[in-house]
């Protein structure tokens, strides 16, 4: 684990009692590249503790139709890696919320691994999640990420062996991403996810001891989040957030609909 404490470490260290960390996934450039920074700030104001900023890619194999749609829309709207770094810079003018870039390895290779990590560190990114770069194949990326103070966050899933969970825990910086179900991203029925995930969560707790643990894939409301993340440090929501934007944009009040949804995710119905 990296020695220097960054923004990701801080939110877990400052967590009190049974409070759950809420990390939200937002596709950079969706629904409009010009509003992404504003949305990040709005999500923070309404309860987000951390932001995963998705780097759109034309062949997102691990993503379901919702995030695929958002990625394609962002690409069509002209989002680029440099524009994503610019979004992070804009957020950093007003906020210290932890920001993790999440995406696929091909765009990183195309940009240049060293250059990518350097730019990410310069603009204020805190960590990286690259699902198709497993620990055995991420040596160069991890090396350059560490130089820039970027945490490498790896994933465990129900089909991950206990031995591999422990190894991923050793290689991760910041937190371990627990994929609650096998398959692509997308909101699912909460009871379905909760029933299938309990044995997995138990194994995660037994084998991931060095890092905080966040669970994602399939969470769509506060009840789901509290049930599924009850024995972990927090939860991640992506597809349900994107779907909320898609259902309301560009009608008047779409941002407020999004922020109301986020507030309910974090605090429940009041």
Image (tube, rainbow, N blue to C red):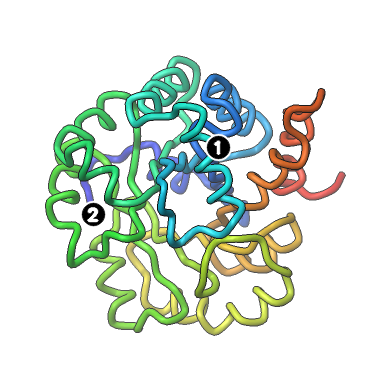
Q: Position of residue 36 (x, y in %)?
A: 54, 27
Q: Position of residue 167 (x, y in %)?
A: 25, 72
Regarding mark 2 in the picture, which secondary structure is present there?
loop
| Residue 202 vertical position relative to residue 259 in the rendered view, above or below | below
Name the foreground residue: 135 vs 133.
133
Q: Is residue 61 above or below residue 42?
A: below
Q: Which mark is residue 1?
A: 2
In the rendered structure, find residue 23 and report the number of the disc placed on it: none
Looking at the picture, tell me which residue is in the foreground, 142 or 174. Answer: 142
Asked whether, in this view, residue 7 is left or right of residue 184, the answer is left
Residue that appears at 58% across and 22% down? 35
Give the class, few, some or many, for how many residues have Cα within 10 Å of label 2's Cα (few <14, many ≥20). some
Mark 1, residue position: 73
Image location of residue 97, percent across then percent down = 48, 32
Q: Where is residue 171, by image quadrant?
A: bottom left
Q: Quadrant of the C terminus?
A: top right
Q: Nearer the viewer, residue 66 or 39?
A: 66
In the image, what residue occupies the spot 28% across and 51% down? 105
- For image coordinates 17% across by 32% down, the residue present is 115
């Amino acid at each position: 684990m990296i020695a220097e404490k960054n923004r990701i470490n801080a939110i877990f260290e400052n967590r009190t009692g049974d409070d759950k960390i809420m990390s939200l996934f937002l596709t950079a450039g969706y629904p409009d590249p010009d509003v992404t920074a504003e949305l990040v700030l709005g999500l923070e104001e309404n309860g987000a503790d951390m932001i995963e900023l998705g780097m759109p890619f034309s062949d997102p194999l691990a993503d379901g139709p919702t995030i695929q749609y958002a990625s394609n829309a962002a690409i069509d709207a002209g989002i680029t890696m440099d524009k994503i770094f610019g979004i992070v810079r804009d957020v950093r003018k007003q906020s210290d919320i932890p920001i993790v870039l999440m995406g696929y390895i091909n765009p990183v290779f195309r940009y240049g691994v060293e250059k990518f990590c350097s730019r990410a560190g310069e603009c204020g990114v805190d960590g990286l999640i690259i699902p198709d770069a497993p620990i055995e194949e991420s040596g160069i990326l991890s090396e350059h990420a560490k130089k820039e103070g970027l945490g490498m966050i790896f994933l465990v899933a129900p089909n991950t062996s206990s031995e591999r969970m422990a190894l991923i825990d050793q290689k991760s910086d910041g937190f371990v991403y627990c994929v609650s179900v096998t398959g692509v991203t997308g909101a699912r029925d909460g009871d379905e996810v909760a029933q299938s995930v309990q044995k997995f969560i138990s194994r995660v707790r037994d084998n991931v001891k060095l890092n905080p643990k966040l669970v994602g894939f399939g969470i769509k409301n506060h009840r789901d989040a509290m049930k599924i993340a009850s024995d972990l440090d927090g939860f991640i929501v992506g597809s349900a957030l994107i779907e909320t934007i898609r259902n309301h944009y560009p009608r008047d009040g779409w941002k407020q609909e999004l922020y109301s949804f986020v507030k309910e995710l974090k605090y429940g119905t009041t």
